[in-house]
Amino acid sequence: MKTPILAAALMLAASAAPAQEMTLTTPSERGGQIGSPETFTGTVFVAPVFGPGMNEVSAGEVTFLPGARSAWHTHPVGQYLIVTAGTGWYQEEGQPKRVMRPGDVVFAPAGVNHWHGATGATPVTHYAIQAAEDGSAVTWGAPVSDADYAG
């Protein structure tokens, strides 16, 4: 007798729950914009992939034209870069710059000061995935100087 009551309770609970469904957004629906000169040097196009949702995680598709790069910055929870096209550079403060290519995944741990962008001759595109802490996913620092970029 307990089994039919339990089954009925589960059915009622399931029917009372709001229905959820998968969604799809296209690149044209998500849009994008040229990166701010306060946070980027050169031409950079930043297109949102998804905003902070699950666990405050967000992602953007970022394309750097040759010579373009981010300013120095940190992330309170860290950041993943998934390179999808081109060849770029990234650098952790105090370390030499390194090459990143399609298929590479770069992880910047929480609080590590770094920059990333295109090489001088090639564009690069990557997905940048990061989580927010206390409403912020990034703390921007100074622009990367031409001397540091040439490194």
Image (cartoon, rainbow, N blue to C red):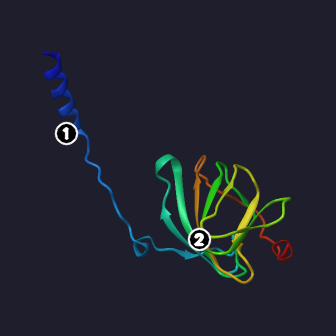
User: Horizontal and vertical percent for residue 16?
Assistant: 21, 38
Residue extending furthest toward the top: 1
| Residue at disc 2, secondary structure | strand
Horizontally, is 113 left or right of 22 in the view? right
User: Horizontal and vertical percent for residue 6?
Assistant: 19, 23
Quadrant of the drawing holding the C terminus: bottom right
- Camera-side residue of 64 and 102: 102
| Occupied quadrant, residue 141 | bottom right
Per the image, the residue denoted by label 1 is 15
User: Horizontal and vertical percent for residue 60?
Assistant: 54, 65
User: Horizontal and vertical percent for residue 9?
Assistant: 19, 27
Q: Distance between the residues labelled 1 and 2?
A: 42 Å
Q: From what the image shows, is residue 145 above or below residue 107?
A: below
Quadrant of the drawing holding the N terminus: top left
Number of marks drawn: 2
Q: From what the image shows, is residue 33 above or below residue 94?
A: below
Per the image, the residue denoted by label 2 is 62
**Local crowd size for mark 2, using a 10 Å CA cut-off: few (<14), some (14–19), many (≥20):** many
Q: Residue at x 87, y 75 (%)?
A: 147
